[in-house]
Image (cartoon, coloured by chain):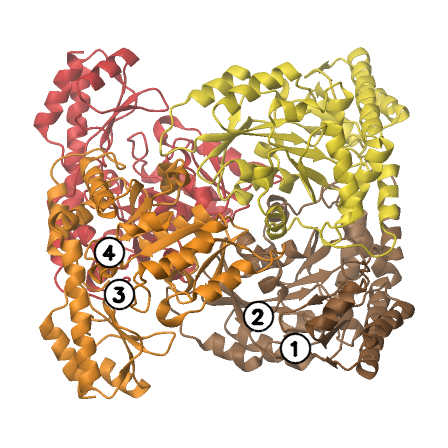
Chain colours: A orange, B red, C brown, D yellow
Amino acid sequence: MRYDFGSDNTAGMAPAALQGLIDANAGPAAAYGADETTARAADLIRARLDADADIRFVFSGTAANAIALSMLAGPHEAVLAHHTAHVCTDETGAPGFFGHGVGLIGLPGMSGKIDARALEAALDEPEVGHRQPPAALSLTQSTEYGTVYSEVELRQLIEPVKARGYGVHLDGARLANAAAAGFDLKQIARLGVDVLVFGGAKAGGLCTEAIVLFDKALGRRLNNRLKQAGQQASKARFLAAPLLGMLETRAWEDGAAQANRMAQRLAAGIATRSPWVLAHPVEANAVFVRMPAKAHARLNALGWACYRFDDGSVRFVCSWATEEAVVDELVEAISGL
Amino acid sequence: MRYDFGSDNTAGMAPAALQGLIDANAGPAAAYGADETTARAADLIRARLDADADIRFVFSGTAANAIALSMLAGPHEAVLAHHTAHVCTDETGAPGFFGHGVGLIGLPGMSGKIDARALEAALDEPEVGHRQPPAALSLTQSTEYGTVYSEVELRQLIEPVKARGYGVHLDGARLANAAAAGFDLKQIARLGVDVLVFGGAKAGGLCTEAIVLFDKALGRRLNNRLKQAGQQASKARFLAAPLLGMLETRAWEDGAAQANRMAQRLAAGIATRSPWVLAHPVEANAVFVRMPAKAHARLNALGWACYRFDDGSVRFVCSWATEEAVVDELVEAISGL
Amino acid sequence: MRYDFGSDNTAGMAPAALQGLIDANAGPAAAYGADETTARAADLIRARLDADADIRFVFSGTAANAIALSMLAGPHEAVLAHHTAHVCTDETGAPGFFGHGVGLIGLPGMSGKIDARALEAALDEPEVGHRQPPAALSLTQSTEYGTVYSEVELRQLIEPVKARGYGVHLDGARLANAAAAGFDLKQIARLGVDVLVFGGAKAGGLCTEAIVLFDKALGRRLNNRLKQAGQQASKARFLAAPLLGMLETRAWEDGAAQANRMAQRLAAGIATRSPWVLAHPVEANAVFVRMPAKAHARLNALGWACYRFDDGSVRFVCSWATEEAVVDELVEAISGL
Amino acid sequence: MRYDFGSDNTAGMAPAALQGLIDANAGPAAAYGADETTARAADLIRARLDADADIRFVFSGTAANAIALSMLAGPHEAVLAHHTAHVCTDETGAPGFFGHGVGLIGLPGMSGKIDARALEAALDEPEVGHRQPPAALSLTQSTEYGTVYSEVELRQLIEPVKARGYGVHLDGARLANAAAAGFDLKQIARLGVDVLVFGGAKAGGLCTEAIVLFDKALGRRLNNRLKQAGQQASKARFLAAPLLGMLETRAWEDGAAQANRMAQRLAAGIATRSPWVLAHPVEANAVFVRMPAKAHARLNALGWACYRFDDGSVRFVCSWATEEAVVDELVEAISGL
């Protein structure tokens, strides 16, 4: 089976990430985050975001997002999110586990972006004791369907939420791809995001993601919280190291740019050389194709791993490791189905 | 500050572990554990234990132990453990978090080993509705105080527990050190342990530990359970890879043997060259010294990180990375206090 | 405001329930359920159900249902239920709270009854690690929309679930109304239900409901479980007493029969004297009417409390306390809107 | 078996409480707490406490205390309490269940009162990431050992806690007995208590206790929180009604005064007519006697239910229902052992 386009988790570590790990491995270092590798990686993230923030490196995006949401909404409250957001569909109920039963309210919207009127309607629902009322908004940038919110779009979603005193979470698993598509990272704090999950894994690192608390008040005894949740690394330097390696060399940006370029190439190939249409605008590193079940099965049979999504389209994901030749090979395969 | 003896988490990855990571990094691979690295590492662990078992690699020992306990005891039940066990004292209440309030019953015993009569007494307590009755026993091998249970000792603890139908968990964060001290890994399954946490981090790996389910019935939908708990790696191969590297080369065993030898050297040096006595038998990789507060402070002031434990003694831990020269340097420092 | 038809929780205790309380109040009694009132009430429930079972009386239906579901599905699993079931829509996420994040999968179906094909489709979904797969089915009898499952319908839903080894829960908040409509209580155990919540509150009692465990293996240390969940009564006799009073006098049955008769009278009155149609078959104690917003508002303005439901219709609920005169008064009011 | 002195939960409802229930049972009323009975009972409690507060009536003391603590401390934090406090020893880990793993730190002190120096020492412990640091103090008035804190004693405990910004909870399961012993209820808010559980069950009511939030900010969406936790009554008026009956007639005060007087009579009888000594000052409604196991067993054999406590003494509890004759009968029995 060829996993090149199956997901952005099938690629390995980028060379800069691996080098970061190797560099961090010299000699003993303080455990549990009091080491220099961790400090430097956090500094670089703050610099990228042009904002002060409490930063912690955790093992997985699932935990990062679920813990972030548990800081914004109590068990008897709910989080508003696009109904296709990863926290709604792909984390086996992790928000409810880490949040002790916290609810999720799925919102509609084209191509993975929350519809602003649907959000307003949900916010305007009268509160009743027997439902979980919203306490936070969860956004994803770039979205599950490979689109990228503009600043204007984000402001339109964030403002009514903040106006009610609710919190805002941004799942940045593919933040590098959004940045490579032109999204300005320095706007995240200014837009009013309270907690960002700064993606490392899909950008070419290990599984690590960084929890970035712009609202530091949320982080009371954050080390204890993470330790209890199984997300405090003893050898913490190795969580930060791959990100440090990528940020220092700008491989974080370069890899995402490569991924996005390859997605464009793939999309163009499919559009011009196959009978099938793209299901969503290709703005980041994913390409969704409206392809009949038989064609999908044949492509799988040819050895290409790829999955059908909830909207019925088939997804192909590019990463830092995707090269032109393999894109062309896939286009060839698709055009010959 | 010199972290050489502060904990066994201050050492980096052993060369074989790092090589395992590098080797696993070639090309794309299936995500979420369906890769070859993961399969091979699990096979090697089963071979070491001479037993069939379901095996998963998770990010941290805290999570591994807490999830294991949540499989053995319900929220309204409790786990019996030595009152100094890591799950009782050093995991910020993680068993209660992952176990939804599950209780811990601390048992006494010399040098980190549970006293068999205290265990029997706890098992014989009449059950009442307003307490959390025991449903499982948690053991640690080697113990928090650097001692190693014999098979006879373990049998004496496990038998009465199994006779009541309760489960048994073994925290093997330092299992390699126990093995290097002569403990036969093939006895674990035969003694009736239901869940083992097979240690990787302190043995020279990344933070990864392996959950080993001898009782496979406990593992219903284990992938879902781990995913929800933030312990399912997308790039799973990198969790298994350092362990694979160490197990293939026997660095897992060799590093522990080195650590234990260095602990012996350190203990001998302190016993002969300082006025202070050892607090516990030195059977694995840790040395505990009854040292006055002033001497401890002076040692810290000299740059040696080391910590006072609940029993009042000061702990020094050796690892795969500890070398004779640095042991001698420390002995020199201690003898000159 | 007139609450007569607002819900079946607006009526007080039936005289037999109050008398049961008064009778139970003579002299001291053992606490925490070891009293005679509790024993006798449990015996009467077992007799009604013609089955052996472990029975406990708990404070609220929310807790009864949520705890029952937590016995059938783990946090990383899900419960299948009609999307309008009380556990899905009206309990502020209690299943997730008591079940540590357990999921709910809402199923469609006419008038509150689960569609058998939709259930089969959900059961046939391929399992994946990133979703919560079903582990139990939750049924409601009579349903949220005032309909009553036949034995054949229940068998059609329960059989495929049991065939997969999953559990079955029956929310019997309005079980008395189903029985009064002809449903044979003795079939519940025979159909394979594992846990029943036997309704007391809506039948004319206090808030108490009984958890009935046909599968006694689910009840390991049940007293501890309930105590921890805040559902173990110190003065337990007062939880059982109202139900005892109603069961001994058959007020449980008689009150439900009265409620159902009044619902029929109300339905007939609305059907013949108003321009609006009934939204669902009237088989138990609730009447749902397709009524425009303006008419609903006018009815509220006249002092009649009643609520619009998720399906867009307005609900009127009868209870043991509903009398012909007040039904006629409401029909008069509706016909004059 | 005679349960008169077994616990203060073995007595039934006081006549005024039962009358309150009967009075509340006339006609329909709004559900879920929007009724007049609930409003009036809350007003009377605020008047007794001479303070504004958000008040809710919940089903059980276990839930009331556990939910209160979950408002003051996060899962990764801990609550300081006397090691014999009900929340530590008698609620089957309910704080951990409702608080998602929140820790409890048991403090020593004579006769159920927390030692102020032990509290200061616990507050002064350096915070580390691998422990659950304190976030709140839980007090019990009157204490588990039948003693009553003075205002001075409470101030000494509360001040250092508030100085650190932590919260204070007061378990008032036997608050009426403390008040009858001279404790001024109007001091509770002034002393800085954030959440009080105002006792109803032991004072002669049903199982109901009132959660009293002096710090209203803790009560965000309190109805939702209680509903989710299974502690929102549909027929809410019946939770408030027994308390309303007792507060309107001052049976709440009178019953506690009777209980305290009977405890004094019992204590005097035992002190003068038996060879055994009292284990603790008798300041409220409980008498603890240092009695050999054989004597205790003989007393049980004579039909008197009574229990040995953790401190080794045997407890006898008086209630509103205890009469002189039965006290004298018990004294007779004890003196004749």
Task: Name the disc covering residue A201, or none.
Answer: 4
The secondary element bearing badge 3 is classed as loop
> Image point 43% across, 67% down: which residue?
A115
Residue at mark 4 to residue at mark 1: CA–CA distance: 47 Å
Dots 4, 1 in contact, CB < 8 A = no
Say which of marks 2 and 3 sits in front: 2
Residue at mark 4 to residue at mark 2: CA–CA distance: 36 Å
For the C terminus of chain B, which image quadrant? top left
Say which of marks 1 and 3 sits in front: 1
Q: Position of residue A258 (x, y in %)?
A: 14, 64
Q: Position of residue D181 (x, y in %)?
A: 76, 19
Residue at mark 3 to residue at mark 4: CA–CA distance: 17 Å
Dot 2: chain letter = C
Dot 4: chain letter = A
Residue D275 appears in view? yes
Residues indicated by labels 2 and 3 sit on the same polypeptide chain: no
Residues indicated by labels 4 and 2 sit on the same polypeptide chain: no
In the figure, A94 relative to B6: above or below?
Answer: below
The secondary element bearing badge 4 is classed as loop
Name which residue type carries label 2.
His
Say which of marks 3 and 4 sits in front: 4
Residue at mark 1 to residue at mark 3: CA–CA distance: 44 Å
* Residue where numbered disc 1 is placed: C111
* Residue where numbered disc 2 is placed: C83
Name which residue type carries label 3.
Ala
Name which residue type carries label 1.
Ser
Q: Position of residue A335 (x, y in %)?
A: 18, 86
Residue at mark 2 to residue at mark 1: CA–CA distance: 11 Å
